[in-house]
Image (cartoon, rainbow, N blue to C red):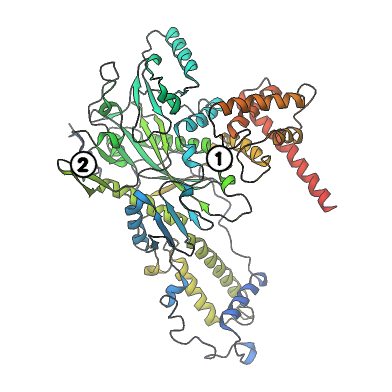
Amino acid sequence: MEPAGAPPQGCAPAREAEEPPGSPALPAEEPQGGQPAGPPPGEAALPAVAGRERGRRGAVPQGPGGRAARGRGRRAPGRRGGEEGGRAGRRPRVTVDSSKAKTSLEALKISLRQLRWREFPFGRRLPCDIYWHGVSFHDNDIFSGQVNKFPGMTEMVRKITLSRAVRTMQDLFPLEYNFYPRSWILPEEFPLFVDEVRMMKDSDPSWKPTFIVKPDGGCQGDGIYLIKDPSDIRLTGSIQSRPAVVQEYICKPLLVDKLKFDIRLYVLLKSLEPLEIYIAKDGLSRFCTEPYQEPTLKNLHQVFMHLTNYSLNIHSGNFIHSDNVNTGSKRTFSSILCRLSSRGADVKKLWSDIISLVIKTIIALTPELKVYYQSDIPAGKPGPTCFQILGFDILLMKNLKPMLLEVNANPSMRIEHEQELSPGVFENVPSPVDEEVKVAVIRDTLRLVDPQKKKRKDVQRHVESCKTTVNVRYNYVLWYRCQTLEEASEAKEEAREAGAGDGGERGGSRSPEAGLPSLCLKQVFPKYARQFSYLRLVDRVAALFIRFLGVKGTTKLGPTGFRTFIRNCKLSNSNFSMASVDILYIDITRRWNSMGIDHKESGMCLQAFVEAFFCLAQKKYKSLPLHKQVASLIDFCEYHLAALDEKRLVCGRG
């Protein structure tokens, strides 16, 4: 019998740079048609080089045959000595503003030291390459560089907004989105909740459900409680001022050492357009501290048995702080996979299911994120680019089916925990499990968004182009009349040094990433885009919505914009007049505004527009299932808008 918490025989302790047992089982991505090439060989690629070299060196005395005289015009020793140490001046360090990092500061500092990047803990007057915010995009006013938050992300992953986004996708693709528990939004859907529960009990008298109530803006387990019947919901003044989501409770979770646990996986949303998603190869498993029993009226209130929140269980007398990633109340996810693998579980399928869950959830969130993004960073105006680390909380059922619990816009990146030295006296002590996982996630996120990497790639691509030209035209004017072979060799060496940080293939010990482990983040999109692209219908609806917003920076569609959308897409006819269009707009907008959806602006929000679009699709294509109705209407609208754009283009040329 294997001892509780011990790693199974043959499984080494998890390491951040290793693949967890079982890699994703999704098909490998298809070739993208070859690597991007540099400029084609020939003279077209040379003038810019020549111009750059002439500007760098000034006029070069010419020797016989038009070549620069050897020994003349050379750099004096130490000429670049003032540029931060000779060659280092040609590869400036990445600058990071960490003044708003908050609780992730320690992990960020370790990551920056490992990368040898430059930190500005109190901010900087000059722009930085990267701004690391602890809470939201608006922690600071940023006009350039990169920031580690997307505008609107905090609002999008709140429990109610997330539930609405997933529900929209469940309406379109019910089987693909069955990883999210059945949910109702309080208080507006309380009557619906009561009716549906009564109907299900009438149809199946043996059904004994349990429900979990989660406040919309709650975190760290605050305000969560379990009920057995809708009448047990605390419909007091607090539920009116603090809306909530009620979900069907998962009564048969997978247990380890007789304890319930959940998984915190870290997901990097590197880009919104084009969509680019990475998943960390390891995560955290957070355990309850009392042996699990299925919910009864007697144990409903035992939070240490039913709720996996670390912030709750740390106050339990049974909580175990461990320096071993395989034991204690917080462990690595890879250690759990190792145990499951030793028992014969198909961990490759489990990883495949988790990757599918993450991609589908992001697809559900991106439409509204794009509306927020264009509002804060309108096209054509200066602004930063964004990326963000998200925390996915996932529960494994007894049959190893992953279920999404929630998504965190600001997952904790603390790498220490409080330890009570004496009654009432606490001290922060390092947490090896947290540090192993979280530092790797932050460090490798920075490596992926490294702004110098693109510059190094451009330099290397240019040098490769020049090398081709040199080989083809060996006895010709090699670098557009003024570049000698000696200079070409020097430029090649410089580019090799600059490109060494991009994977360490060249440059040896000069690489800024030399000695670092392989990336702990694995790309899953666009790698598996082909399998999931058909799900992105609401993304295309959001593109129509944004097109007709009219005023840059707004997030709601006015009645004029809605009428223009109907007219340009040719959706009105004798059976659906413009008067009917106005009635549809008023009815849906009024209902969504009554739900308390952002009263800062008047007009139709994206969710209301999606509902109106679905209604139009059902009117126009009555005999098809909903997802085909919506897809057909999108194609119809895009066709007419493309024809309109082409007509305007022709008129503009005329």
Q: Nearer the viewer, mark 1 or mark 2?
A: 2
Q: Position of residue 503 (x, y in %)?
A: 43, 60
Please provide percent x and percent y for residue 98. 40, 56
Pick the front one: 10 or 281: 281
- Judge whether residue 273 can be spotted in this image: no
Q: In the picture shown, does residue 396 fall above or below 459?
A: above
Which residue does the image show at 63% across and 31% down from the upper left? Answer: 609
Residue at 43% in and 27% down? 244
In the picture as drawn, the residue positioned furthest to the left comes out as: 422
Residue at left offset 48%, top offset 35%: 361
Whole-number angstrom distance, CA of label 1 to CA of label 2? 43 Å
Q: Which mark is residue 321?
A: 2
Instruction: Determine the image quadrant of residue 25.
Output: top left
Dot 1: element: helix
Residue hosting label 1: 530
Q: Residue at x 59, y 46 (%)?
A: 374
Residue 4, compared with residue 249, is above or below; it is below
Q: How would you rate the neighbour count of disc 2 (Cα within 10 Å): few for under 14, some for 14-19, many for 20 or more? A: some
Number of on-image labels: 2
Q: In which quarter of the view is residue 240 placed?
A: top left
111 displayed left or right of 544: left
Query: For mark 1, does the 10 Å Cα neighbourhood hold few (<14), some (14 to 19), or many (20 or more) residues?
Result: few
**Residue 132, can we see it?**
yes
